[in-house]
Image (tube, grey):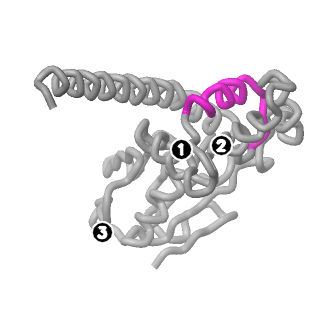
Amino acid sequence: MTGLGKRGDRRMMNQKQTAYLKEWQGYEGLAEQMLPIIGRLYRDHNVVTTVYGRSLVNTSTIDILKAHRFARLILDGELTVVDTFPILEEVGKLDLAPARIDIGRLAIRYQAQAGQLPVDEFLRRELAPVNTGRVPLLDEPRDIVLYGFGRIGRLLARILIEKAGSGEKLRIRRRWSARGAPETWQNGPASCVVTLSTASSTASSPSTKRKTPSSPTEHDPHHLCRCP
């Protein structure tokens, strides 16, 4: 191969790399725009957004792209954020009741109907059962009292805080542990922020505030979760 031919091949390879990079950056940009919509649906409507069963709540840009790549194992072809972003954008405009909405499956169904309906009308038809306005899951949030704040108690508290959503389901109202017990959040990283205050005997997170009772009999009387 002549030097001219090699230079031509190298130029073509560089052009492909540039095109791939721009395509990837475009995917990243759409995934970043999806994050606030996913968060708002979860916080305000208790709607969990998924892609073929994989939750997108409390995820990163890369996690969203990975979830779309995972869909290749189920579908015959590719599913990208280019397909799902218009769906999610319109879903975010609806006044939804609590639900799990799979934007991946909706995107495939929308493609299958070959433009017979605009995306907004298609979604109003598909999501009619949950497009009924925001309603609470329970008449009032169910209070949780944690007895014991050891390894299992801390793990359970993390899960409850991470799954709080709009706070209309379960709320950690109090937790009790022996005085002098270590107040640490160990056993791995938590996807939440917890502030412990020994002065006021409280532990708070962005979704809940818990009081440390002075005895195991000082608690909210309704719903208890006992941890060893």
The boundaries of the magenta stretch are: 81-98
Label 1 crowd bin: few (<14), some (14–19), many (20+), radius 10 Å: many
| Whether label 2 touches label 1, CB < 8 Å | yes
Q: Quadrant of residue 86?
A: top right
| Whether label 2 touches label 3, CB < 8 Å | no
Q: Is residue 180 left or right of residue 211?
A: left
Please report whichever mark, 2 or 3, sits nearer to the chain's N-terminal start. Answer: 2
Quadrant where the image shows the N terminus: top left
Label 2 crowd bin: few (<14), some (14–19), many (20+), radius 10 Å: many
Residue 3: x and y in percent read 11, 24
Which residue is at 71% across, 41% downward?
108
Please report whichever mark, 3 or 1, sits nearer to the chain's N-terminal start. Answer: 1
Q: Is residue 96 above or below residue 145?
A: above
Q: Is residue 217 above or below residue 27?
A: below
Quadrant where the image shows the C terminus: bottom left
Q: CA distance from mark 3 to mark 1?
A: 45 Å
Q: Is residue 39 above or below residue 153?
A: above
Which residue is at 74% across, 34% downward?
111
Label number found at residue 68: 1
Q: Which residue is mark 2?
A: 104
Q: Is residue 95 magenta?
A: yes
Q: CA distance from mark 2 to mark 3?
A: 47 Å
Residue 79: x and y in percent read 58, 41
Amino acid type, residue under disc 3 in the picture: Ala
Q: Nearer the observer, disc 3 or disc 1?
A: 1
Q: Is residue 9 left or right of residue 85?
A: left
Q: Nearer the observer, disc 2 or disc 3?
A: 2
User: Could you tell me what secondary structure mostly forms the magenta stretch?
Assistant: helix
Q: Is residue 64 magenta?
A: no
Q: Of all residues shown, which one is farthest toward the left?
A: 3
Label 3 crowd bin: few (<14), some (14–19), many (20+), radius 10 Å: few
> For numbered disc 2, what is the local secondary structure?
helix
